[in-house]
Image (cartoon, helix red, strand yellow):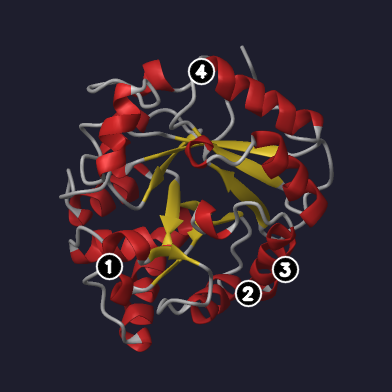
Amino acid sequence: IIASLHPTRKEAAVPQILIPYLALFGIPLFTTIRGARQAGFDGVEIHLAGQSQARALRCRSTAYRLGLRVHLHQGWSRDENPTHWYNHALSALGCLPPDGYRLIDHIPLGVLDPVVVYAERLWEASGRPFYWIQTCCQPGAPKISFQLFLAAVERGQLPVVFDVQHYLEFRLGLEGVGDLPTDRRALMDLLGAGWKHLGPLTKEIHLDDADPRLGHTRGRNVPLGSGVLPLRDFCRMVKASGWDGTVVPEVSPFHLRGQRRRYAGLRRQVAELLS
């Protein structure tokens, strides 16, 4: 069994900050990991889209050799995410899991690191405490309702990944950020209500921003602070609740590509929001 190899150290009662890594956007793994370590990130969350299980394990080993924590993130298949044209090309190139795949065939066998999985997979995730269920379904019309998701995770006390942007889409039944409200007070009310129920179950937060004016594709995962989401108020609420899990800032790779110094800026920005 490939057990979790988190670096041994005294854990502080403050959130750990991990940087996401997605192989599909041309950023070399070592550039991301080395830049993350130099910038002070505690670890890396490796997205499984675009990677074979063997390559994902090599990525994992590289991160551990550099003293970083590792989380994994479920990928997607063409039939799960047909809304973007490039997914059809990626599927044809063999960069995505096959249509109809199962989690047990997708997640590297024996890995006990936390794995972020989408909400419609909560039935597969039940009974596997290292599968953490994200507050969203795959893109497109939600496969399950938010109400069903909430009832299931509360009843089963299942571990949750609270994704700020995706939670709002899921809660409002939207298929993208283009129709999100722009009133920060209204958005914060929604986030506060969600945290009341999901905060005690949340193991990880995906901290992201959105700008509905830019549409579904360009308006999601914009640089933190450049969108309409009330991130400062949200982080203040999270801190007041005493939460001390893992935070992953999800900014589009296009905003970080080729700019290692931006990793340090992103790390400082997240730390400041959480302070």
Q: Are marks 1 and 3 in contact (CB under 8 Å)?
A: no
Tag 3: amino acid: Arg
- For marks 3 and 2, give the CA distance: 9 Å
- For marks 1 and 3, give the CA distance: 28 Å
Is 125 located above or below residue 16 in the figure? above
* Disc number for residue 128: none
* Disc number for residue 215: 1
Q: Quadrant of residue 162?
A: bottom left
Residue 73 locus on image (x, y percent): 48, 37
**Relative to the observer, which residue lies in front, 108 or 242?**
108
Which badge, 4 or 1, comes first in the chain's sequence?
Answer: 4
**Relative to the observer, which residue lies in front, 254 or 7?**
254
Mark in front: 4 vs 1: 1
Tag 2: amino acid: Leu
The residue that disc 4 covers is 53
Which badge, 1 or 3, comes first in the chain's sequence?
Answer: 1
Residue at point 84% right, 42% down? 9
Residue 245 locus on image (x, y percent): 60, 54
Which badge, 2 or 1, comes first in the chain's sequence?
Answer: 1
Residue at point 17% right, 52% down? 145
Tag 4: amino acid: Gln
Q: Are marks 2 and 1 in contact (CB under 8 Å)?
A: no
The residue that disc 3 covers is 268
Which badge, 3 or 4, comes first in the chain's sequence?
Answer: 4
Which badge, 4 or 2, comes first in the chain's sequence?
Answer: 4
Residue 11 locus on image (x, y percent): 78, 49
Tag 1: amino acid: Gly
Q: Categorize mark 4 by other alpha carbons within 10 Å: few (<14), some (14-19), many (20+).
A: some
Tag 1's secondary structure?
A: helix
Mark in front: 1 vs 3: 1
Is 53 located above or below residue 244 in the figure? above
Residue at point 39% right, 18% down? 104
